[in-house]
Image (cartoon, rainbow, N blue to C red):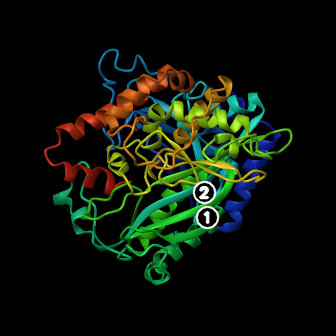
Amino acid sequence: MRPFLRRCGLYDAAREAAVERVLGLIDAEGLELVRVGWCDLHGVVRGKTLTADAVRGALLDGVGMVSTLMLKDIADRTAYPIFEPGGADSLPGFGQGNNFVLLPDPDSFRVLPWVETTGWLRAQPWLTDGSPVVFDTRRILENALARLREKGYRMVCGLEVEFHIYRIEDASAQMDPDDAAWPGEPPRVSMIHPGYHLLGEDWFDLAEPALRIVQRTAQSLGLPLLSLEVELGPSQVEAVFAPTDALTAADNMVLFRSAVKMALRRAGYHATFVCRPPFRNVMSSGWHLHQSLVDIGRGRNVFQRDEPAPDALPTDAHCVLSDLGAHYLAGLLAHARGATVFCTPTANGYGRFRPNELAPQSVLWGRDNRGAMLRVVGESGDPATRIENRVGEPAANPYLYLASQIHAGLDGIERELPAPPGTQSPYASGGAEQLPTSLAEALDALSQDEVLGEGFGAGFIRYFDTIKRQEVSRLDQAEDKEAFYRREFFGRL
């Protein structure tokens, strides 16, 4: 019987060799279990755990996955009435709880460092006829990157990820069956450092036991971690990663979040990538995405400008960015409101957009300005010239976040949009367009953005909107908003 791989058009000598290599590693490492993980719409890793003997079959023929996993909101409630007549009509390939096939990528194989004799493989869903599932978010990014390649470019991304780590003091409420709820309570926690001492070495020393776990976990998985830092907020930290190609950066973000949460939990810590944990005096966490484009043929950063444009002022984009880079910047600005929901997809994240907290409020760019939405970094002749988007929250789905940047930036390039002057006062009152202040407003902005609608596809936009509107509706109906944030976000993301 021909393997499912062949039906998908993926079976060749290189893939067969990769499968044998993974099986050899499993045998050499004495692994007993292998987890097959897939990133859902919300950036959360789900999957199945296989015995070592079952891995060959999974690599060739995939693993069954119920399609409703792709229809869940952030609290695991199915957003479509699939068992009613016509309930799945707008969902290509979906039925009444039918199966998809999770197909693992052998090149993603890792040995998990925090658990004994266990490996890990990243997978993507396919329809049983061997065609791709169009709503798979990794495929959404792959399609966006294909648009870039057609133009002769590839995307390079660096990640700065803020998050919070707490010490678990009491998990009884979370684990007591009499208190079980949908979703349940998180554990009771204490802080690993008291905050308000940015980059303080003594505060880092307080947090070092937890951060050492983060460091060892990331490096054991081959992630390009550069630094770990104590952030301003109580129990808040930051991880910084070296730049990679965009798809690798997104894969790394998914794996990093999932891995450090599990590794820290086993050591008695609760890590959360929710933007605003449910405590007084908390500081919001952001995910700052550094991005540039590289000419595939020449290997040159096409955002780099060799000399400032004649008569360019410091606030002119052409003082730092190439003409193409300035057009890309203008595209990000033109579609900032529509793209916000992909950068900040949870209702919790909109509490971050506050003045003078190093988070953006307005659709502005600035040169090395951390209060602006887009921070242009570099100098003339600097091959590391790049644009940093500061809208993102650390819980964002990386594939959708990066895809939104590509579609927005390409529109700026294709239409040769001019970049406005940069700001030197990002929080001053004025006529600048404002970022959305709620998830509902952000969804409305996306629905009005024709360019993003075409880039992501009208079907995906409807699908995404349906699921996220359910989150908005449940928040609106919640009698206790604090409990909603605590249970749905802090305990799960």
- Which residue is located at x 49 percent, y 20 percent? 458
Q: Position of residue 24 (x, y in %)?
A: 73, 59
- Which residue is located at x 60 percent, y 34 percent? 419
In 3D space, how far apart are the residues under numbered discs 1 and 2 (Cα atoms)? 7 Å
For disc 2, the marked residue is 52
Other-residue count near label 1 (Cα within 10 Å), few / some / many at <14 / 14–19 / ≥20? some
Secondary structure under badge 1? loop
- Which residue is located at x 75 percent, y 40 percent? 309
Is there any visible trace of residue 97 in the rendered image? Answer: no
Q: Position of residue 218 (x, y in %)?
A: 59, 65
Secondary structure under badge 2? helix
The one of 62 and 417 positioned closer to us in this rendering: 417
Left or right of 413: which side holds 239? left
Answer above or below: position of 438 versus 224.
Answer: above
Is there any visible trace of residue 200 in the rendered image? Answer: yes
> Residue furthest toward the right?
298
Which mark, by number, is residue 489?
none
Q: Position of residue 303 (x, y in %)?
A: 72, 43
> Residue furthest toward the front?
311
**Badge 1 vs badge 2, beta-carbon distance below 8 Å:** yes
Q: Which image quarter: residue 269?
A: bottom left
Answer above or below: position of 428 versus 403.
Answer: below
Q: Position of residue 295 (x, y in %)?
A: 79, 39
The one of 433 and 177 positioned closer to us in this rendering: 433
The one of 230 and 384 positioned closer to us in this rendering: 384
Left or right of 63: which side holds 80? left
Left or right of 28: which side holds 44? left
Viewport quadrant of the N terminus: top right
Which mark, by number, is residue 31?
1
Q: Amino acid at mark 1?
A: Leu
- Which residue is located at x 51 percent, y 38 percent? 64
